[in-house]
Amino acid sequence: MRDKFESLVFGVLSGIISYYLAPALPAAPTPFNFLQYANHPGVRFVVFLLILWYVLSSIVDWVRKRSRRRVAVASVSSRACDIRYTRWEGVVHHFGVDWDAKYGSPGYSDDYIGVAEGPYCPECGSELMDGDESRFIRQDKPIWKCPGCPFTTARPKRFLYEEREAVGNVIEREIEVEENRMSDLETDDNEEGGG
């Protein structure tokens, strides 16, 4: 969706640039003299648009980076609780990386929750670091990078900075589905044996 939007924006911008720049260019090929065309109002307008676009995109990137740091701190503490009674524990693979996962009860209620710790490198097992892959035109791409090996992977766009909670929810759902399937099988076996 975002790529389509960027394509649309670049298409509109290239149309505007060519509309204002075409009258400033000579009809016949001549030696290019930049100062001759720099004073044309269309060229000045296009340069103004480019400078405005660069400044606005820099401001948006700066705001996103600042808000991203605050969100990351809040998301870590939002689900941080110790599981006192573990029903299942293991390593799961989601979003292209490994997570240490637990499913159990915190002890103060009968509710079961899934908690994920990580992410960890699927190649060497090191804990991954947050990073950004800088790009020329578009905003920086958030990535995970491994300090122990050259592994890097893009962070998911849908659950950006909420990956840990998303993996915990997936663990809960998968175990509950499996438990329901097992209880349905047991119910079917009891009905067949009793009837």
Image (cartoon, grey):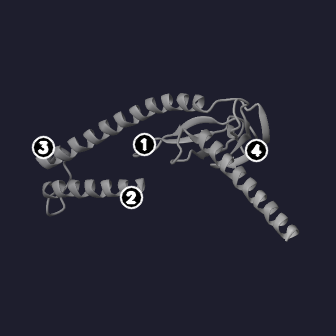
Residue 182: give x, y in percent of width and height.
78, 58
Front residue of this view, candidates 35 and 30: 35
Dot 1 lies on which element? loop
Query: Which callout, 3 or 2, points at the residue further toward the start of the chain?
Result: 2
Q: Amino acid at mark 1?
A: Gln
Q: Nearer the viewer, mark 4 or mark 2?
A: 4
The residue shown at (15%, 63%) is 28
Query: Which of the two discs, 2 and 1, sits closer to the camera?
Result: 2
Name the element at disc 2.
helix
Q: Which residue is mark 3?
A: 39
Nearest to the eye among marks 3 and 2: give it. 2
3D distance between C-alphas at marks 2 and 1: 15 Å
The CA distance from mark 4 to mark 2 is 36 Å
Outermost residue toward the front in this view? 195
Of tags 4 and 3, the one toward the viewer is 4
What is the C-alpha distance between the residues marked 3 and 2? 35 Å
Q: Nearer the viewer, residue 76 or 150?
A: 76
Q: Which residue is mark 2?
A: 4
